[in-house]
Image (cartoon, grey):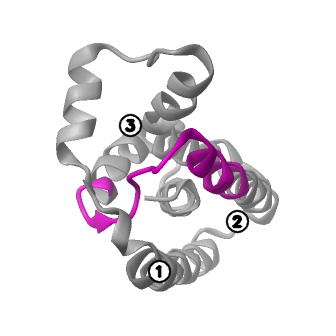
């Protein structure tokens, strides 16, 4: 699953709660729920991973900045906490590339690997269309949530 979709789900979670302490763990849980869905993600090489991950990471950071700027000030910390929680489990990937190891305990990594439903052939058929549909749905829900939570 691309990080941008995780970030969008975390923004929605944060927009629907007042509590950063709730948004963060629910964001983490949403990460695993999304990773259990069929998606693209097996990498041919380090270069392939970096080509996709850098672009997706930059888009994800842009989405984070935009979401924090778009929500009312009282909701910003909760929205940020939801996005951080939703993205956090994927820190293992760049950590392995750059430092040779995951920052998480082995049981965490084993669980994360077991629930992944990834396949290299899904990129064009699922990730682009499905990811775009998912991103659109998250954005629509976030807009609705924003209207609901305006001060």
Residue 43 part of the magenta segment: yes
- Residue 111 position by quadrant: top left
Q: Position of residue 96 (x, y in %)?
A: 50, 23
- Crowding near pointer 3: few (<14 within 10 Å), some, many (20+)? some
Q: Earlier in the sequence, mark 2 or mark 1?
A: 1
Identify residue for label 1: 124
Q: Position of residue 59 (x, y in %)?
A: 73, 60
- The magenta region covers 35-57
Q: Secondary structure at mark 1?
A: helix
Identify residue for label 3: 25
Q: Position of residue 118 (x, y in %)?
A: 29, 58
**Residue found at x 25% / y 64%:** 37
- Crowding near pointer 1: few (<14 within 10 Å), some, many (20+)? few
Residue 151 circle label: 2
- Vertical order, 86 against 9 (above or below): above
- Vertical order, 122 against 151 (above or below): below
Q: Earlier in the sequence, mark 2 or mark 3?
A: 3
- Residue 134 position by quadrant: bottom left
Distance from Cα at disc 1 to Cα at disc 3? 31 Å
**Residue found at x 57% / y 73%:** 142
- Vertical order, 117 against 138 (above or below): above
Q: Secondary structure at mark 2?
A: loop
Pointers 1 and 3 in contact (CB under 8 A)? no
Distance from Cα at disc 2 to Cα at disc 1? 41 Å
Q: Quadrant of the C terminus?
A: bottom right
Residue 23 lies left or right of residue 143; in this view the side is left
**Residue found at x 27% / y 37%:** 112
């Amino acid at each position: 699953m691309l990080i941008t979709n995780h970030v969008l789900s975390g923004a929605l979670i944060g927009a629907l709660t007042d509590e950063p302490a709730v948004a963060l763990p629910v964001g983490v849980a949403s990460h695993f729920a999304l990773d259990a869905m069929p998606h693209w993600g097996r990498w041919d090489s380090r270069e392939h991973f970096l080509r996709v991950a850098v672009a997706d990471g930059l888009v994800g950071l842009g989405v984070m900045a935009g979401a924090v700027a778009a929500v009312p000030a009282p909701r910003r910390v909760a929205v940020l906490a939801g996005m951080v929680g939703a993205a956090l489990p994927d820190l293992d990937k760049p950590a392995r590339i750059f430092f040779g190891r995951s920052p998480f305990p082995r049981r965490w990594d084993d669980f994360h690997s077991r629930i992944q439903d990834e396949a290299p052939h899904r990129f064009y058929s699922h990730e682009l269309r499905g990811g775009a549909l998912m991103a659109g749905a998250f954005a629509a829900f976030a807009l609705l949530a924003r209207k609901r939570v305006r001060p």
